[in-house]
Amino acid sequence: MVNSMQQNQKLKVAVIGGGSSYTPELVEGLLKRHHELPISDLWLVDIEEGMEKAEIIATLTKRMINKAGCEINVHLTTDRKSALKDADFVCSQFRAGRMEARLRDERIALKYRMIGQETNGLGGFSNACRTIPIALEIAKEMEELCPNAWLLNFTNPSGMVTEALIKHSTIKTVGLCNVPVNMELGAAKMLGAERKDITMQIAGLNHLVWARKVLHKGEDKLAELIEQLLGGNDQMMPKNIPPFEWDAELIRSLNIVPCAYLRYYYQSRDILDKEFTASENSTNRADLVAKVEQQLLEIYKDPMLDTKPKLLEERGGAYYSEAACELMSSIHNNKRSIMHVNTRNNGAIQGLPDDCAVEVSSVITSSAILPLNVEPFESDTLRLIQQMKEFETLTVKAAMTGDIATAKRALILNPIVDSGSHIDEALQETIRENLDFMPAFAHRLA
Amino acid sequence: MVNSMQQNQKLKVAVIGGGSSYTPELVEGLLKRHHELPISDLWLVDIEEGMEKAEIIATLTKRMINKAGCEINVHLTTDRKSALKDADFVCSQFRAGRMEARLRDERIALKYRMIGQETNGLGGFSNACRTIPIALEIAKEMEELCPNAWLLNFTNPSGMVTEALIKHSTIKTVGLCNVPVNMELGAAKMLGAERKDITMQIAGLNHLVWARKVLHKGEDKLAELIEQLLGGNDQMMPKNIPPFEWDAELIRSLNIVPCAYLRYYYQSRDILDKEFTASENSTNRADLVAKVEQQLLEIYKDPMLDTKPKLLEERGGAYYSEAACELMSSIHNNKRSIMHVNTRNNGAIQGLPDDCAVEVSSVITSSAILPLNVEPFESDTLRLIQQMKEFETLTVKAAMTGDIATAKRALILNPIVDSGSHIDEALQETIRENLDFMPAFAHRLA
Amino acid sequence: MVNSMQQNQKLKVAVIGGGSSYTPELVEGLLKRHHELPISDLWLVDIEEGMEKAEIIATLTKRMINKAGCEINVHLTTDRKSALKDADFVCSQFRAGRMEARLRDERIALKYRMIGQETNGLGGFSNACRTIPIALEIAKEMEELCPNAWLLNFTNPSGMVTEALIKHSTIKTVGLCNVPVNMELGAAKMLGAERKDITMQIAGLNHLVWARKVLHKGEDKLAELIEQLLGGNDQMMPKNIPPFEWDAELIRSLNIVPCAYLRYYYQSRDILDKEFTASENSTNRADLVAKVEQQLLEIYKDPMLDTKPKLLEERGGAYYSEAACELMSSIHNNKRSIMHVNTRNNGAIQGLPDDCAVEVSSVITSSAILPLNVEPFESDTLRLIQQMKEFETLTVKAAMTGDIATAKRALILNPIVDSGSHIDEALQETIRENLDFMPAFAHRLA
Amino acid sequence: MVNSMQQNQKLKVAVIGGGSSYTPELVEGLLKRHHELPISDLWLVDIEEGMEKAEIIATLTKRMINKAGCEINVHLTTDRKSALKDADFVCSQFRAGRMEARLRDERIALKYRMIGQETNGLGGFSNACRTIPIALEIAKEMEELCPNAWLLNFTNPSGMVTEALIKHSTIKTVGLCNVPVNMELGAAKMLGAERKDITMQIAGLNHLVWARKVLHKGEDKLAELIEQLLGGNDQMMPKNIPPFEWDAELIRSLNIVPCAYLRYYYQSRDILDKEFTASENSTNRADLVAKVEQQLLEIYKDPMLDTKPKLLEERGGAYYSEAACELMSSIHNNKRSIMHVNTRNNGAIQGLPDDCAVEVSSVITSSAILPLNVEPFESDTLRLIQQMKEFETLTVKAAMTGDIATAKRALILNPIVDSGSHIDEALQETIRENLDFMPAFAHRLA
């Protein structure tokens, strides 16, 4: 299946945000696939402020490569352009404003009685406005330095960042998330099936995605999977997401397997109440993440460590590497794997614009991402998708123009955001606190 | 313009819920148009429990007719079938469960931290479930007793009741509301124009409606009207709705004139906060209405009163009569007036099913309601309409089947209802408290 | 109903192609409405080659005005810009290439075994390519000289010319045709009804239009009208179109009243066979028209003639004046008449682009044309409309770009044109013979 | 990749029309895949009149199996039910009315100056009306005797037969044609590529299908393939279709690779003229086919023959076996191959109903056919698809109801059929001559 000519080619991979504590996971995945993905150069790019941490990561990376006996040159740099020059794959996993910004987003959201989350609601909006201008800057550099490279985006909010890239750049972009791959792996376990015998059809938007079909040996096991999910045996959830109970009556009626993030839409008040409680106990999500982060770095520093440590899996990024490396290999080798990615809609999901980003099961070829067709959703589920997509599209527009009315129109449409005069205040505060990353909005503070 | 043959015909009008305190307004409208709408028999139908009040109304009605010097026989009855027999027009303005049910709805909604309102959110849902079975029963009787009559529905929630009638009955049904007519009359005043020179194009759903065009002598005055609205000179609002401030930045960006009820969607938290305050001060809307109601009845009893009293206008029903009587006259005389009514979509608003009810400016003929075409909405406004229409359609389905999962799917889609486990509790309480009117749901309490 | 302020205004009307033998009909219509349409200046514009004929028309026009006792200044000129300067209404009724071009189109079409007709098939394509560049030139002048004027286009092919104007000019344009007005007047006669009591809903494209509803006193008389049509009592057809027999089985199944031009699509081979026979007998349509034209001019020269002569009605333009003058009056006086015009779709007919021209019943106001919503067509009728609209849209594009592949794509989609290598030859011949009017295509002959 | 448990299973395959001279090709394909498709029983079903020929085929089949050393029991029967009982796969390749009917169809079509072809125009209509009732009868028997079997339909007109089965039966049905597989294999040759490196995305309807993407090692080779096609190097055409020249200007502008049958739509008059000439020379397609058929049977009789003879490839069925056997294997082994099949649309092609049959590249699993999403077509190509689909849907409806008006509506919409009074005559003759197969239409002759 693997094309020998291509295999001889030496590949250059650049990782933007390479100093991330997730990087060891990516490295593990690359090493596991070295026979089919012949990488010669791995460039880790990070910003000045992140170099201390990045050095730790780069050093660990080299130890891991040595142990695997592969020949991959590791480069750590703050000079993005050198890293992008003639790259074959660019993995984007940076965090604009670093963990502080995420903490701040959650705090502001809660202050205005809103769910604080980095990919939806006010937090998702804020994150998008910080991130999209940088993502487009990178894409612009790629258009010049490596126009034929593929851009794999895991930077959150992945759906909106991917949409901005698809609409405003010519670079071949695929948006990735570990949620669908977790669903597929988990479903296989729950059904006692081998993963290779399962064909799962997944569709929706990033973090708003459902399994529509769970095909296994001549049968659709959707109903069985739903019952297991409701019976408490949910193995599809990323480890970092705490378990909770679905409304069984609702899920059975919808007859669809929701991703874990759907709780934000099917149980929004319960989540908000929990967040308030957690906040009072100083146990909000971002804080927890920061703590694990610190622990990880300590472990990474250990000069004896030459594999990915167990603790990393608890960060919630598990299978990012699975998804990213499989995607690179499938492109490189024209494997035609079915993967669940963020790509241009082109009618795959009826009722959404052709030019927006959707998260759908797709056949991965060396030349193009070919989405499987999505059977029409039931109309209430479609309405939710349309509403969230409109939020995303308006947010992308606001991020690029700095238009505050567009921002408001985005937010009041979002189902986890109440409309009202507090929106104006929350936006003011968000802009003020993120001014370095949102110069386009500065005019509104004057 | 008036067809002489038709004019000679004597018309029979039946009013379901004829004992309503709004009836004098309707009577006033009919008397004003007696030259073109030759009614010989006016049947007021009400239930046993409402007869004391209905007697007061019927007596006042007779005094008003006498004063006007018209020959109209007034009949008061609890026997709906006699009233419907061979009727030409049936006006439906009953309230299922009377004012107590409305008060109860508002109370339950607030208990679960939701906006309490009789046409949207949990209150609208509850009201629809009580009302739709009765409305369909009336339509069924009409199919037998007066199959060619027109049914004018003002019973709230008017949009959902009209949708149920359109989908499940063969009777020609038009849904009416005083909101659009208030917008048109108010806009004329605000622009210093004569009403006859204004052509206002209105579109959306009942209580979720916007003016799209405000045509006057070769120009579209939309922008001017928006500025007046934002400048505080709003004369389009029904008198019973307290004034409030729109977000000017938002409304200018939307570039559309919202009806007063849009505040529930553009300022939902502000409304909820106000309702909480009012509730603590025992000044909720339903209580106020009940008080005015009592005052009205006292006035109606005065044997010297032979015209509609001023106080009635404060009830919020102003121009109901305007709308209803003009509609009957326009049908009877094939006037081809442009009115704003609830009717079958048939593609008038793109992006909604053909068979749902929409509120749109339409040409009224003696044979059919011909909606003006609606130019495509901007996509975020369309998403709001689609979402609310889905809520309405699921609510109609739930009202007819008693399926609780359908009810939940309706409610969690509604933008003024949070999803979460409180929905289940709120539904349980709603069903328990309305059991006489919602037998279809009884199974869920067992 | 008539606005007094506007009535005092003196109106300037310019007629492009004013030397047409149809002009007396227009003049008659204007004189009949002089009380509500206070025209002070009537400008007749024609080209140098047409001046001899135009003088005859202008002189007759003056005699007609004198007889009516109105004060209207008549101006005959070849200077289009003077005529357009500050005009209120511009009527466009020119014929690019004059009658010779039409004769030539029919001859070329027949040579390649195709129906020869000035508004569809190869003839319609050729006519569009000659006419659209001139129509856009006029619109451009209007944008400068009378940007607020209304442009009433009767120039054929009216649908395609209107589409070009709607898409490529800012001038308020309405396309007119005498076919729908003939249908409405004829239907009233056939049903023994007064026209004012009939509301006919007409929809489709120019010369591809159907009556969907024929409302009369509470009933839809569509079925009755279809039976009369099939029974041989067709009074809806313009006088110039020879009668023929519909396939009754087909029309009953379609359950829709076709305009006379639908025979080209429902009986295409019969028409083609007839045209061949006529052509062998030298009695093709264009020849006949030329002969009547000559007779008319002789009559017009009579210095005693001061009214529209009877013979004109046989030209097929009857009720052009009816349509045009009623439209001007309805705009001037904000009458809100329901007329059947070519205007921007905006979703009125589902399944067509928003920005294309359609022919639909519309409410005429002083500020805008408001189409009635069109209920979804049955799908085979919709497919025919979509196919013809695509032909029209591609033809407009070809006319503006001179792209021959676009021309071919247009023609092979047209249901009365066979695809095949003869298309290339027919196009070559058409371009060669019309080179003065189709400079954009010249490159293809080299 | 192959599932071992399933492999142990013994498969039963039934072939309806097993006496076809194509059967040896199917047998060859099955033998080639015996290691992955463990067939134990092969049932050949045919009608009494075909038994002589069927015996020859069955005997050859046995010789081929013996030579291959496989253990497959061959059963020849006229008892369809025994063959269907517990079958795993049913291949339907019968011809209703046998070759005589096809010859008759072509003759009648030409008599009325229409293209005579077994899958489109009048011939396709006639063939569908004969075939669909039988196909549905088979499906009904399958629902009882082997409800979980897959039905592979190659019976022409394959698109319409598949649509009838999809709409009116619960049996899992896939429609197959050798056209797309010929395109894929030919494209690989033309591009000098290995087939496994090519991913071709094909979409449209049966015999109205285009390649949209021709992906090869990171590039889309569509433009290159078009130039080869226009340059005369067309290796994508089934061998039985005579070569001809495309209009290069047109095809380049369409920027899409047409299947060979598109000539009927892009060059219809040229085809018709050729058919007339051929008919005068008695060399029509059906006659040729009959002659080759006779030769084949003589060869098959040779007791020494134990492989598929070369001559069979000239019949035009080449790669039927390729397609059918690969499909069975892909289903049996859950291979997830990308194949080009007729299946339910479900939105894969935008602008067509969800429930119609389309021919699209799909991922074949053991549980379901998952179509790749189809990017929106350019609008004129979409219009052609929509028009032909409407013809097909109306034809299916006519075949089932015998409604003659529906038949007319189908035919006049078809781009290779002129409308006109000859349609009525041609339909009469078709019904009269096929009365045994079209009892539903008998009423129309009375």
Image (cartoon, coloured by chain):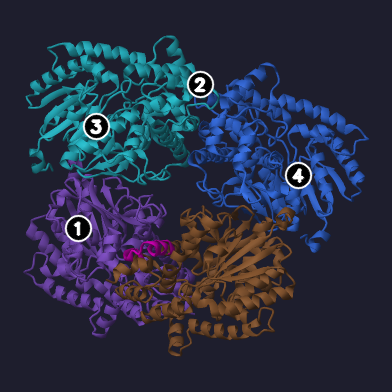
Chain colours: A blue, B cyan, C purple, D brown
Residue D173's quadrant in the figure?
A: bottom right
What's drawn in magenta, residue-wise? D392-407
**In the rendered image, which residue does mark 1 sit on?**
C225
For the residues beneath circles 4 and 1, the answer to whether they share a chain is: no
The residues bearing labels 3 and 4 have C-alpha atoms spaced at a distance of 64 Å
Q: Nearer the viewer, residue A331 or C73?
A: A331
**In the rendered image, which residue does mark 4 sit on?**
A322
**What's the residue type where badge 2 is placed?**
Glu
- Residue at far top of view: B281
Residue depicted at x 56% and y 75%: D20
* Residue C166, position as x, y percentages in the image: 37, 55
The residues bearing labels 4 and 1 have C-alpha atoms spaced at a distance of 69 Å
Numbered mark located on residue B425 in the image: 2
The residues bearing labels 2 and 3 have C-alpha atoms spaced at a distance of 39 Å
Q: Is residue C29 above or below residue C20?
A: above
Evaluate if marks 3 and 4 touch, with contact meaning CB atoms under 8 Å apart: no
The residues bearing labels 1 and 2 have C-alpha atoms spaced at a distance of 59 Å
Q: Is residue B325 above or below residue D311?
A: above
Principal secondary structure, stretch drawn in magenta: helix
